[in-house]
Image (cartoon, coloured by chain):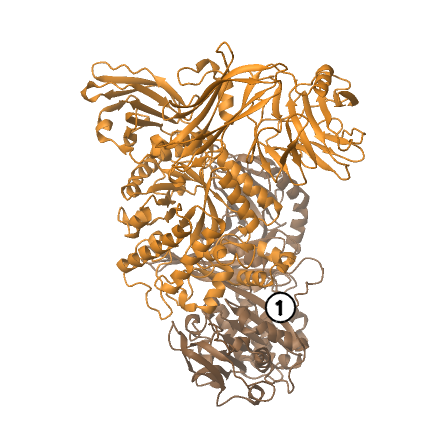
Amino acid sequence: MTRRLLTLAAALGLALLGTIHSGFAQVPPPAVAPPPVRVSEVPLAKQSEDAKQTSYLQQMFLDNGVRLFGLQKYETVSKQTQASGSSVGWFAPSEGNWYHSDMFDLLVNGQSVKVDKSTFTILESGERGVVDFTLDNKFGKFRCRFMVIPGSEVLFADFAIEPTVEVKSLVLRLQNYPSSYHATAEGKRHRQVLDADGTCEPQAAPYVTDPNADWWYFYQDAIFDKDIPERREATYGPSALVLPAGEAQQVSTTVGDYQVPIEITYAPTQRHFRLAFLDYFGLGNKEAQARFVQERDQIRQTLQGLVFVPTRLRQAQANLPQIKPDGLTGEAAAAAPELKQLLAALPGGDPWPQKPVSAEARALQLLDVYDKARWVATKRARPGIGVLVLRGLHARYWGVDEAEQLLGAQLREAATSYYSEYYWKGEDLNYFPATWPELSRFDVVVFANVPFTVLGPDRAKALAEYVQAGGALLLLGGTHGFGQAGIDQPPLGPLMPVQPTKVFDLQTFASPQPLTKGPAAPEWLTGAGVDWSKPPVALWYHQVQTAPSGRVWLQAGGKPFLVAGAAGAGRVAAICAPPYGVAPTGRTGFWEWKSWPGVMAKLLVWLGRGEVPTKPTAGAH
Amino acid sequence: MRYRLIGLVCGLAMLVGAGLVAAAPPVDPALTGYWSGDEVSGLRVFDASGQERSGYRYGNPTQVPGRVGRALQFERGDTVEVGPGTGLGPGGSFSIEFWVLCGVQKTNFPMFDWGSIADSFDLYFDPPAGMNLRLAGFKAYDHVTGQVMQPDTWQHVVWTYDEKLTEKALKVYVNGELKQSWDEAGKLGVSKKPLIIGQGAALDEIRMYKRALTPEEIAAHATAPEAVSGRQVVISEVWPAKLFTRPGQKVKLQVGVASVSATPQTVTLKAFVEAGLGRELPLQEAPLTLAPGEVKELSFDWDPGANLYGFDLVAELRDAQGQLLDRKSESFLVGKNPYQLGQYAGYASYTWDQDSVISARRHAVMMRSHYIPLSEYWAFNADTFGKCVPDTDKWFVGSGATAYRLDNATTEALMTSCHELGLGVVPYSLSYVSGYYGTKLALEHPEWMAYDRKGRITGGVETELDELMTRFYNEYPGSLDDKDLMAAINRFPNEGAGLQISTVNLANRDAIKYHAESVAAGVQHFNFDGLRWDGHPQVGGPGDPITMGVPELFDLQGKPLVPNTTERDRLSVENTRLVKSLVLKVNPDAVFGYNWGLEYQKHGRIRPTDYAECCRDGGTILWESVNSIHDPGSPWHRWQDAADMIADEVECPRQNGGFLQVGAFPWWLAGEVYGKHLLSAIFAARARLFNAPGIETNAPYLHFAARYADLLYDASVARSPEWAAATKVSSPQVWWQKYVFERPAPEGKQIIVHLLNSPASEFVEIGSTTPPTLLKDVQVSFALPGGQAPKAVYLLSPDRLPLRTPLPATPQGGNLTVTVPELLYWDTLVLQF
């Protein structure tokens, strides 16, 4: 519990801070209507292990500036049978209400389909936040899509079903613990569910309602209420559920003295259905009820009008004639016709009627292939460079900020993400592009003392594809760099210009070592634009080996200092000494060298565009 | 003090034998407070009403010549606060009376203020309209006199409200003449906020009544201010200037006597110190003559000699016939080590505004009011105050910028307030280098840090906060105005941010020396009274070289920092001794406390060797494992297990010459029932308490532990298996077996038996509202060795007044049976031989 709370608190803070800065001037965004929805992820990682099973946890944060929604997936693997199961819960803002570790179960013919492994992925971030929980097992393919839209405190969900068994019954079971986990201490029964017929008090038998008449449900606790001062600390606030018209057949609610299970029955032929979940976190019963009364009609209307199909697919569908295999080869050329065919069959607002899960997954896969193939041309056509700096400890000493300032108008876009790591929660970035369209806005991604390990497998794969497709990476060392960073691990490892020799690779020079030009140093680095009259020194270095693709441009004490190389259509560079130590009087640490920001600026341009300015960069501090 | 007053009023009939007798009625039963301006001691401003409503000075109100005797001069920001929660409030009918001397009024100044928005009451200068009395809940909120205050002359002002009147119920008189009246009706709630007096004028003879003074009384007071309504002489204050004094130092004890009679009065004042179980150590017994309206202050420099622990300063006033007019007492402590005596409380500042200075003083006042002799100052990081202080007078500390922002002014206010009131302050310090300074050190000396198995710097990294802090320090003080920066910093959660950056490399002597010197520099800079130190490895237990559960630590080459636990303990002892020696060099009286964590579960009674070093010379072990007994996962979730565990654990530091402290309870969740059971179990076990849960509701427990500290904390109080075997208690509900002690007291042997009533619930429920079943007539019998009868038997309890009652002690046939009439939570029997 403690760990979870801490993680949540930290994540809340991180997500709040996660706005992309537009350049170093940090000009606030124009005052427009609701901010976009930011989605970030804490990758799947081992949570606990005992003699019987291993548990894994993955968290998603969707922040629309009004509310931070935290969803998490638990995956357990039995050590005896290797059988696995997954569940998803809504753990922020409250851990109660929609149960934080398992808020729903989908029953086909009375059997849970939440077996075997699952995926939990970010689909969209920006105009709306969307994450998918997907199952693929003996019962078929199932997807629960959670959506957060700007300005709303509602968690919308859409379930898509692609069964491989004959469906005789279809039930969605929801788990709600109204307002609090504290319910039994006094043996009192005080959970309540309000619906159009009145108040349902605890009883053994379920309340069965017709969702066409009773389409909203409000869950509260009569005692654990924010308005009762002595209970204030022990309660979250009420919650609610809204159903759209014409989908469910029956809702069965059991009001217990602790838990309130809800079973929604659908016709066996139903292939997708939607719900709206509310959590009135922090509000007393009265105020929450008043708000719910005021907004539930609108919420239902919004729910019914939402298009859950991915925005990218809809946009591609709108531009169908422009999707052509012209100029493409191989996989990308083959993708275009199949993509066009799939998009042509996509109905207006609903998923594909047949195979809604797999058809959509295939269409997105094809669109990625197609977009990446087109990216080099897209990149060339746009001006300047976009730089995403992942900032770790001591990042500010690397001179990247000053370099960006020097770049002036050449810096088309700048974004910052901050790294954090605690032994009790693992490591995290407060921002990383969640999708290909988001990542492809940047020409260079800088790892300033940020390890690759923070990425997790999915983001590492996306980044490797990004480099192969023409993107660039710059590695800067430090306490979390190189050996500590796992930079030799696939899929990114083989693309790097250097390889670590060991984990504990940070080493001090016996004496400060001046920077010297390497055998492959380019003219823009060694020429007139850089003042080499009094070379700066490095005091520490990472013990690395140059990879076959790497070219040593600068050295210190005979060790590689700046190594650059190509990887696929992209470029990579590494500075293998950290800005550590105190330079003796009369010597200058390289990070304090007057020419350093200029070197860094040129390096960014070389990485981002494959070319460097012929004159010293314009712009001033 | 407050609860004792209530007890006196309620318990008049039962006061016998213990030296407590019924107090005479107050001067004027309706006089609820009287601050004459004549009696001030340090931060304390005495109340002459006899109602025990002395206040504390905030800012610097000074004594100046008054209309009668001395007055208090208040400049902007100077106040006297009474309360909070004194119950003082206009209620129904009331009068507010004072003499005021002000300059030409140009701006608004409050004179009296208490209450929240809902039960607001304030009276302020409102030039040019005169004065404005604002009363929430009345027909009108504002009541403006319409008369400009005369500058540079003493004026007598009385506001009266008579709830029985339907017309002109609210009146204001200036210099005895009615100036304005209002047809008002209403009733003010009794506020839990403090009454704040002050600002912008000199005020004298401030009196509040819960009745409307008559026009005749007002006219009389205006013309002859010495002669006010009332008939009596009262003890206005008994005031040990310091709560805690070290042996060898004189204890300044003050007694105030005030006459509010219109005629001269002669009374007899008896002042004495009561030690132990009623031992009187005389100060003075002599007649006193007081002129009308006169107040007399008596001050004694008392030498405690060999006496230690808890005492009462007692004053009794008798008339010529020997009849008791008034009796008041106040407790104080004498000891070598404030850690030893009961409880202590934590302090942290959250803001950099002026309120933080006031809140620092409030903290000191709160501690003093609850007999808490030592405060912990959550500075967290040795460097934060040790090295940054010369560079900046504002700084961040540890656990998230939201949580702790400290500055010189606040820290100095805390130190001076605490020291003036006789309270110690120790900073809480770690062997971490966190925040800005940790980031900088890791940059300059990566070899000073400790690394985990992955080669990462231990503890953690919060890059954005690191960068914001760096910007703060580099651009200080300009960055204080950077709202964006401050807003961003404020968004950081508390949790975890304090763990930024590394544990120090224990094996690197340069690093250790640097930190030890930093700690000592901080102690010296602020004149701290010692240190609570988390820089020793025992917190992590064997295998966890330094704190916080980081499983294994390495140096930059990937080698374990220490090869084995023996070496770890050796380095730790060295480290601890170094820190201790440097701190003692700057403060020879410094006291030390250390953390102790969950490793107890894993390793039983095996302590690393530095445990003994930490306990030595009265070192205090703070053991926090007990703070989660309300959690069903706690191994001590059963009340009895928790109580037994505390009772047993006490012995470990005792055997090594130190003390056990338990605490860090989730006080914000704690209910009264939980608090009382817990405090009983802790104090009866002779453990000390850190951060009392429910400090207001459990105030009697804190006072009890201070007053009878000798029975709880004297090193000679030891468990007595022999007496435990000779004792029987009639009720199985009572827990007592682990609480039978023998003490070779200075005045003869004492057998101390604590009786704890078992809770209503078997398991610990932190928010429980169900008190234990009240046990009546509990029989406790003792088989007296050799048939020797005790000289006296006393029953003590913080659950009722008086705290101490003598019981009949007549043995029969070699056995002594005593009856405890009522046991709610905790009673103590003392057999005095």
Q: Dividing the picture into quarters, in which one does residue B82 lie?
A: top right
Task: Please tell me which residue lies in front, B694 or A223.
Answer: B694
Judge from the rendering whether residue A327 lies leftward or rightward of residue B336; answer left or right. Answer: right
Q: Where is residue B651 in the image (x, y as percent from the top left)?
A: 29, 40
| Residue occupying the point 73% across, 29% down | B133
Q: Chain A is drawn in which colour?
A: brown
Quadrant occupied by the C terminus of chain A = bottom right
Q: Position of residue B392 (x, y in %)?
A: 56, 57
Q: Can residue B162 be seen in this view?
A: no
Amino acid identity at mark 1: Arg
Q: Where is residue A558 in the image (x, y as percent from the top left)?
A: 42, 85
Task: Determine whether B412 is above or below B712 in the image.
Answer: below
Residue with the most extreme top position: B321
Task: Please tell me which residue lies in front, B456 or B330.
Answer: B330
Judge from the rendering whether residue B87 lies leftward or rightward of residue B345; answer left or right. Answer: right
What chain letter is assigned to the residue under label 1?
A
Residue with the most extreme left position: B786
Task: Please tell me which residue lies in front, B322 or B761.
Answer: B322
Residue count near mark 1 (Cα–Cα under 10 Å), binned few <14, some 14–19, many ≥20: some
According to the image, label 1 marks what residue?
A: A312
Task: Please tell me which residue lies in front, B686 or B255.
Answer: B255
Q: Can residue A331 be seen in this view?
A: yes
The orange chain is B
Q: Position of residue B362 (x, y in %)?
A: 55, 39
| Residue occupying the point 68% across, 76% down | A409
